[in-house]
């Protein structure tokens, strides 16, 4: 019986840890706000996410982005493999890797500009 409880506890711990760091694909345009990068998601709500590196710091995000996307005034769409985290009541993404990048906007309202 104790072995069963230990196995069940181990499985529950593994499941909780796996769910805490679930990775998803987030696509949106990049914006630089002061010293931080923000992803504006390509959906109707245009949800905004502060970008963080794998260690949770904002400083390492710059190295993950393509040089063309960092040019002031450039409009760039990126797809990021990331996990969501709450940061002082704001949405943030812990970026694991860049999946894709292209010039231009993915937002529907950009079609009418």
Image (cartoon, rainbow, N blue to C red):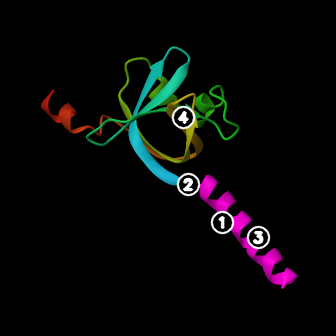
* Main SS class of the magenta portion in the image: helix
Q: Position of residue 58 (x, y in %)?
A: 62, 27
For label 2, the residue is 23
Which residues lie in the magenta part? Answer: 1-22
Residue 23 on image: x %, y %: 55, 54
Q: Secondary structure at mark 2?
A: loop
Counting residues from the N terminus, which is met first, the one under dot 3 or under dot 2?
A: 3
Q: Which residue is mark 4?
A: 65
Q: Would residue 51 be found to the left or right of residue 15 on screen? A: left
Front position among marks 1 and 4:
1
Q: Position of residue 63 (x, y in %)?
A: 62, 32
The residue wearing badge 1 is 15
Q: Residue furthest front?
A: 1
**Residue at image location 54% in from the left, 34% down from the top:** 65
Residue under pointer 3: 9
Tell which circle, 2 or 4, labels the residue nearer the N-terminal end. Answer: 2
């Amino acid at each position: 019986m104790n072995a069963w409880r230990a196995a069940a506890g181990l499985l529950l711990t593994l499941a909780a840890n796996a769910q805490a760091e679930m990775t998803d694909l987030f696509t949106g345009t990049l914006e630089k706000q002061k010293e931080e990068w923000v992803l504006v998601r390509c959906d109707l709500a245009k949800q905004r996410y502060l970008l963080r590196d794998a260690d949770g710091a904002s400083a390492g995000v710059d190295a993950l982005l393509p040089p063309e996307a960092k040019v002031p005034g450039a409009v760039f769409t990126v797809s990021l493999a990331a996990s969501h985290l709450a940061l002082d009541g704001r949405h943030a993404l812990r970026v694991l890797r860049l999946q894709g990048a292209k010039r231009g906007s993915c937002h529907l309202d950009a079609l009418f500009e």
